[in-house]
Amino acid sequence: MNYHLELKNVKKQFGPTEIIRGVNLNIKKGEIHSLIGPNGAGKSTLYNLISGVYELTSGTIKFNNKNIENLPSYEIFRLGLSRSFQITNIFPKMSVFENVRCGLLWNMNYKYSILKILDNNQDLNDKTNAILEQISLSNYSKEPAGLLSYADQRALEIGITIAGGAETILLDEPTAGMSKSETERATNLIRNIAKNRTVLIVEHDMGVVFDLSDTISVLVYGEVICSDKPENVKTNQAVKEAYLGD
C-alpha cells in the first residue's frame, strides 16, 4: 500500500541522547490520525522532523511518495504539508481577514507582491471570506487577531493553514487550555476540515482523541508501540501499562 505520509526507521539524536529510536509510522490519505504518549515520549520532536524543523539522524520520511526528510520547512509546506504549533502563531496586529488573506497569497500565486492592490481582488477576498465562514470567524473579520479569545486564535491558525493549500495538516495539541465548550467547538472544526484533508494530531485529551481518530499511534520513549483503530488501542495491554492505565 502507498501511504500518504510514511516514516521508516526514523531516528533523532541530540549529541549522545537518542530521542526518536526508530519510528515507523504510516498515515493514510484522508484519515484523522492521532499520536499520543506520555510527556517526553518524543511527540514534538517527531513533528519537528516531519515538518523540517529538525534534520533526521537517520531514516526516511515520504510525503505522497516523495522523500522530504531534511528538506527546509518552506519546501515541505509548498508540497502541501503544514503544521500548527503549541504556541499560537498569527499576526496579532493585523485583522482576522488579513491574516487569512496572507495565507492565500502564495497559494494563489501572488507571492506577497506589494504592487497588487489586494482590496480590489474579488476572487482573493471571496476565498478569504469562505475560509472565515468555514472556521466560524466571519463576525470577527475586521477585528485585530490579537484581540480574539485563545480558542478563536487557534481556529484562525487553522484557517491560515487551510488558506495555504495544505492537503495534510499537523495539529499540535489543538485543544490545550480550552474549556469544555471550546474543546467541543475545536473538535467540530477539526472534523469539518478533515472532510477533504489528512490530519495528524498530537493531543493529550483522550476524549478528543477517541472521538475524532480513525487511527491512533502510541509513542513511548521514542518508539511506536501500537498503531491501530481506537477500540483496539483502548484495550491494548501494552498501551494501558505505558500510558492509558486501567
Image (spheres, helix red, strand yellow):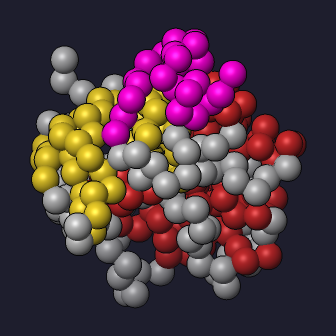
Name the residue at 52% across, 16% down: 236
Q: Is residue 216 left or right of residue 205?
A: left
Q: Relative to residue 92, is residue 48 drawn left or right?
A: left
- In this view, the residue in front, 100 or 84, is 84
User: On the rendered structure, is 67 left or right of 194?
Assistant: left
Residue 218 percent across, percent down from the top left: 46, 33
Residue 30 seen in render:
no
Task: Tell whether position 158 is magenta.
Answer: no
Residue 227 drawn at (x, y percent): 40, 24
Residue 186 lies in quadrant: top right
Magenta stretch: includes residue 243? yes
Q: Nearer the viewer, residue 78 or 65?
A: 65
Residue segment shown in magenta = 223-246
Quadrant showing the C terminus: top right
Q: Say if 101 sits above or below 22 in the image.
A: below
Say above or below: 86 vs 201.
below
Q: Report which quarter residue 134 is drawn in.
A: top right
The x and y percentages for residue 156 are: 64, 60
> What residue appears at the point 72 percent right and 30 percent down from the top-left corner?
207
Nearer the observer, 129 or 205:
205
